[in-house]
Amino acid sequence: MAKYGRGLNRELVAAVNSGLISEPFAIRDVKHLVREKGWHPEVSDKYINVALVNGSSERPSPTYKKYFTSVGQGLYVLKNQFKGDEWL
């Protein structure tokens, strides 16, 4: 599977902190970021959905850091500990 920058979820953290993406964000915002960055191959909605769900799940995972909180309706926000310039 392709890697997008430092990893899709980590890049989302940086994009929110830099103002490229506003909170709450959804799949369409992530697709726009991927296009804007010029990453290939184009990322599927399914891939983004899995990344966001795993990045917000309360279940422990050795492969997904828990950067996000789901606010419902397919929308996500960053957890407070991942906000700030150190996450750019």
Image (cartoon, grey):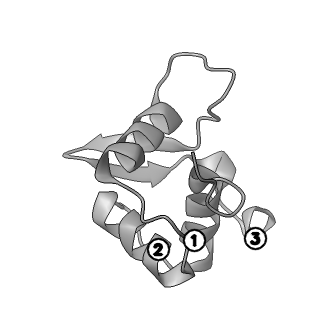
Please provide percent x and percent y for residue 57.
Answer: 46, 27
The mark nearer the N terminus, 3 or 2, is 2
Question: As shown in the figure, which amino acid type bears the numbered disc 1?
Answer: Ala
Where disc 3 sits, the SS reads helix
Drawn side of residue 17 relative to residue 24, left or right: right
Which quarter shows the N terminus? Answer: top right
Q: Residues within 10 Å of mark 1 (few under 14, many from 20)?
A: some
Where residue 2 appears, as percent x and y from the top left, is 59, 53
Residue at mark 1: 15
Q: Which mark is residue 44?
A: none
Tell me the mark number nearer the camera, choosing from 1 and 2: 2
**What residue would you read off at disc 3?**
85
Other-residue count near label 2 (Cα within 10 Å), few / some / many at <14 / 14–19 / ≥20: some
Indicate whether 54 appears above or below 2.
above
Front-lying residue, 24 or 65: 65
Can residue 29 be spotted in the picture? yes
Tell me the kind of residue under disc 2. Leu
Residue shown at the point (65%, 54%) measured from the top left: 10
Q: Which residue is mark 2?
A: 33
The residues tagged by marks 1 and 2 sit, at their Cα atoms, a distance apart of 8 Å
Instruction: Give the side of residue 67 with respect to residue 56, left or right.
Output: right
Q: Which picture quadrant has residue 4? A: bottom right
Q: Are marks 1 and 2 in contact (CB under 8 Å)?
A: yes
The reply to whether dot 3 and dot 2 touch (C-beta < 8 Å) is no
Task: In the displayed orientation, state which residue is furthest to the right.
Answer: 86
Instruction: Decide: is 58 above or below 12.
Output: above
